[in-house]
Image (cartoon, rainbow, N blue to C red):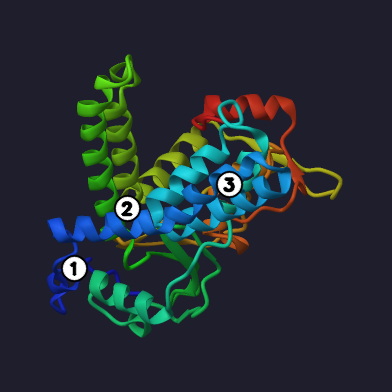
């Protein structure tokens, strides 16, 4: 394949024209949309006091609402699903659905993004590229492709509206926090000790990193270096297979940009699956062979679990 400089020509600057322009009308429109989406949930919330049936129905409505409100809302729901120490387990189990079945965008949008980022059509970049994604998350989706040298790759592409939606929501969160800090102390004591602004800033930094796939590429390279120095071996339980070292997909040089990450395609397992804790974000985002989960077919013994944090992964 040819290594192309990202955003080199074809008027790439025009591809994102207006993407970051967040005027007052855009913020108001987004706020009105979110209010409209959450209104049924707020209005029906008292029904949760009536019975478990209503509580389950409202949880399903919450999951659908969060999934339709964009990456920020989905990420917050995914985070909440991992905190049974904070929320009821039934609540966490319901929100765990946000890790899977996320919407996808069209192949035409993927092709357009590749053209904008690398200045060349799909046919010039890949020998083949699947039109149907093998997995999707709230920020990006993944297609399976083959380079001209025969290397199988995973092509991760941001959703077209992910950046703008996140920017609008993060701006609204900032305004909401400022309003709460100004008004809430008049009615509630101790609000300032909640450090709402710090939490909002931390969430914003996290989301901005998620929107830049060059950061993920750098992390993959870092993981590869760390695990070469301290390899972790896991075994196939009950399958009679040989022990295998953990390895990570490698970014393809020249095919990495803020909105696209091309990496080698390899059979994988989510960390939570290896630790016997069920599914995770990556199984929803990448699915299939790129980073799928094999339902406990492989597991780490206790000693190997303890070695993961020392090798550079917070288990």
Q: Quadrant of the N terminus?
A: bottom left
Q: Judge by depth and name the residue closer to the eye, 175 or 147.
A: 175
Question: Which residue is pictured at 32% across the width and 68% down the height?
Answer: 160
Query: Residue at (29%, 46%) from the top-left corner?
Result: 208
In x, y percent, where is residue 106?
Answer: 42, 78
Which circle marks residue 95 in the picture?
A: 3
In front: 200, or 149?
Answer: 200
Q: Nearer the viewer, residue 98 or 306?
A: 98
Question: Could one spot residue 96 in this view of the protein?
Answer: no
Q: Residue at x 54, y 30 (%)?
A: 230
The picture places residue 129, in percent across and down from the top left corner, at 47, 78
Q: Nearer the viewer, residue 62 or 288?
A: 62
What percent of the width, then of the height, locates residue 75?
44, 47
| SS at circle 2 | loop
> Mark 3 vs mark 1: which is more N-terminal?
1
For marks 2 and 3, give the CA distance: 22 Å
Q: Residues within 10 Å of mark 3 (few under 14, many from 20)?
A: many
Q: Residue at x 72, y 38 (%)?
A: 276
Is tag 2's residue or tag 1's residue first in the polypeptide sequence? 1
CA distance separating discs 3 and 1: 33 Å
What residue did someone put label 1 on?
Answer: 16
Q: Position of residue 26 (x, y in %)?
A: 19, 60
Q: Quadrant of residue 25?
A: bottom left
Which residue is under mark 2? 211
User: Could you tell me which quadrant the C terminus lies in?
Assistant: top right
**Crowding near the residue tagged with mark 1, few <14, some 14–19, many ≥20 C-alpha atoms within 10 Å:** few
- From the image, state whether disc 3 or disc 1 is nearer to you: 3
């Amino acid at each position: 394949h040819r290594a192309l400089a990202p955003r080199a020509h074809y008027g790439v600057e025009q591809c994102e024209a207006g993407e970051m322009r967040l005027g007052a009308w855009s913020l108001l429109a987004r706020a009105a949309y979110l209010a409209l989406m959450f209104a049924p949930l707020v209005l029906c919330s008292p029904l949760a006091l009536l019975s478990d049936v209503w509580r389950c129905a409202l949880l399903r409505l919450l999951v659908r609402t969060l999934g339709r409100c964009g990456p920020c809302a989905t990420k917050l729901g995914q985070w909440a699903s991992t905190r049974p120490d904070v929320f009821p387990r039934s609540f966490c189990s319901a929100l765990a659905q946000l890790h899977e079945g996320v919407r996808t965008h069209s192949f035409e949008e993927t092709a357009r993004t590749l053209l904008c980022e690398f200045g060349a059509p799909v046919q010039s970049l890949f020998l083949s590229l699947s039109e149907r994604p093998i997995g999707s998350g709230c920020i990006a989706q993944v297609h399976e492709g083959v380079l001209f040298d025969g290397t199988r790759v995973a092509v991760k592409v941001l959703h077209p509206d992910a950046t703008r939606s996140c920017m609008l929501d993060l701006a609204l969160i900032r305004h909401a926090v400022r309003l709460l800090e100004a008004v809430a102390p008049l009615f509630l004591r101790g609000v300032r000790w909640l450090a709402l602004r710090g939490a909002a800033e931390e969430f914003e930094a996290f989301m901005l990193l998620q929107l830049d796939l060059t950061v993920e590429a750098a992390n993959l390279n870092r993981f590869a270096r760390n695990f070469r120095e301290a390899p972790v071996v896991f075994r196939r339980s009950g399958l009679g297979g040989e022990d295998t070292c953990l390895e990570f997909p490698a970014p393809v040089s020249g095919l990495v940009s803020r909105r696209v990450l091309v990496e080698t395609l390899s059979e994988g397992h989510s960390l939570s699956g290896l630790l016997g804790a069920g599914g995770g974000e990556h199984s929803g985002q990448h699915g299939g062979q790129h980073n799928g989960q094999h339902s406990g077919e492989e597991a780490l013994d206790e000693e190997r679990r303890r070695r993961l944090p020392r090798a550079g992964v917070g288990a």
